[in-house]
Amino acid sequence: MWPFGKSRGRASRGNAGHRPPLRVVLRARYDAAQTTTENARHWAMADSLSADAANSPDVRRKLRQRARYEVANNSYAKGIVLTLANDCIGTGPRLQLLTEDAEANRRVEAAFAEWARAVDLAGKLRTMRMAKGTDGEAFAVLTSNPALETPAKLDLRLVEADQVASARPYPPMPNEADGIVFDAFGNPVAYHVLKAHPGDRLRAPALKYDRIPAESMVHWFRPDRPGQHRGVPEITPALPLFAQLRRYTLAVLGAAETAADFAAVLFTDAPASGEAAAVEPMDVVELEKRMATVLPDGWKLGQIKAEQPGTGYGEFKREILNEIARCLNMPFNVAACNSSGYNYASGRLDHQTYFKSIRVEQSHLAEMVMDRVLAAWLAEAALLGDFAFLHGLGELPHQWFWDGMEHVDPAKEATAQEKRLKNNTTTLADEYAKQGKDWEAQIRQRAKEKQLMAELGLTEAQAAPPPGEAEDDEEAEGEVDRAAA
């Protein structure tokens, strides 16, 4: 850029004795964009690959193998994945239809609940949630199972991520992403599912596959980048930390065992040419229990001090577990299953962040999995005689209920709930939904109980169940936590 304009530049070039103006270069400077000798190794693996190129089949395969290995051999990793599945899925989602026909709603809800128990829907969803943590994605094929005892024969057949793969060598076709075929608008059209698992040694691996239409395949994963079509394990950032945790624990144990293996040593303060009895170096002397003995002249008996585990061992485990669980939005006391260092306020605050993450996960699961399953079940139920009225109705208004999250202080939550209802800042439907319950079913049940108590002449206090020992212990612990806070 010539700051004096084009005409001045031409005049300057015409005058041989005149010095040309200096070119001004503007340069924005970011420390993170600079490559120095100090940070060159740290940023050596940074790249500009696309989402699918960065998550290539080979990369995802290696991550899956290491994540599965760590979960299978690391107690903390296994517990974290199980806790996520149990907290997210719980005993399974429950359907509530929101049509104007209350009787039809109850019939459909009861039939769907019966079908869900028959196919073990809750168990399969928990398996999918665990696969999402270790494999990065979960697949389920909507298929027919004639062996089901329910009128609807719809079933979910879970497929491991390894089987959804391209049969042709990498790189794939332009409209394919490792077994997923897309149309011109980026919508999935079909999934290629290998007939045999690549790691199944009982059967010879083959490149034969089944082409599953997209409407029959449920694919659940979390895209972290635009244009990402396959998932990576959610515990990927924590894999090196899991390895460090295991290595440090084994190193501490090994050091303690090494110190314990040596019962005692003989040492002398005399010089090499001093007066001391001759003893062979590295000789082994067996000592019997509760026996007095005499040592050689000039020698003393000493024992190696077992200085392991180190004083920072517990703190190291706590910090590294806290860092491991952060990528899953899980607090330390949930990941470690240990709240000994928490008080009431800090425990509740950490749980609020975790429960919000669980609600987001449940919402995503409802949209990507449960709505698809419900649509397929309604389409099949509409063909049955008892539910023929569903034919042609399309998607019905509905919502899903999940297990509620238990409050740390039930008494305080009950008081807050009572105030919200009196101030009309909430509804019974919302309050019951927080507990994972259907408000209509709860009110009907409560009406039956009140009617029976009136017939028997019982008061609320007389019909109330006696408090158990567990509740008394929880109240006592709550008082201690509140005092500490």
Image (cartoon, rainbow, N blue to C red):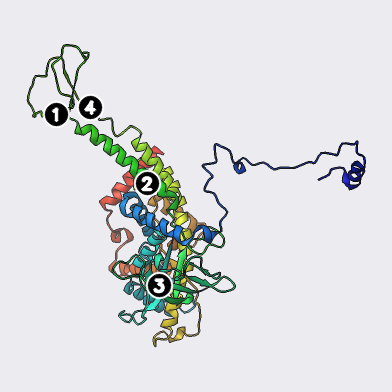
* Residue 418 in sight in this render: no
Label 2 sits on a secondary structure element that is helix
Residue type highlighted by circle 4: Ile
Q: In which quarter of the image is residue 261?
A: top left
Residue highlighted by disc 3: 207
Q: Where is residue 298 in the image (x, y as percent from the top left)?
A: 15, 14
Residue 3 picture location, percent across and down? 84, 43
Residue 243, labelled with which disc? 2
**Marks 4 and 2, how far apart in space?**
30 Å
Left or right of 328? Residue 40 is right
Q: How crowded is mark 1: few (under 14 residues within 10 Å), some or many (20 or more)?
A: few
In this orientation, which residue lies closer to the viewer: 9 or 80? 9
Q: Nearer the viewer, residue 236 or 166?
A: 166
Q: Distance between the residues labelled 1 and 3?
A: 62 Å
Amino acid at circle 2:
Ala
Cα distance between the residues tagged 1 and 4? 15 Å
Which mark is on residue 284? 1
The single residue placed furthest to the front in the displayed view is 16
C-alpha distance separating marks 2 and 1 = 37 Å
Q: How crowded is mark 4: few (under 14 residues within 10 Å), some or many (20 or more)?
A: few
Q: Which of marks 2 and 1 is nearer the N terminus?
A: 2
Quarter of image, res 405: bottom left
- Crowd tier of the residue under label 2, counting other residues whose Cα lies within 10 Å: few below 14, some 14–19, many 20 or above: few
Numbered circle sitting on residue 304: 4
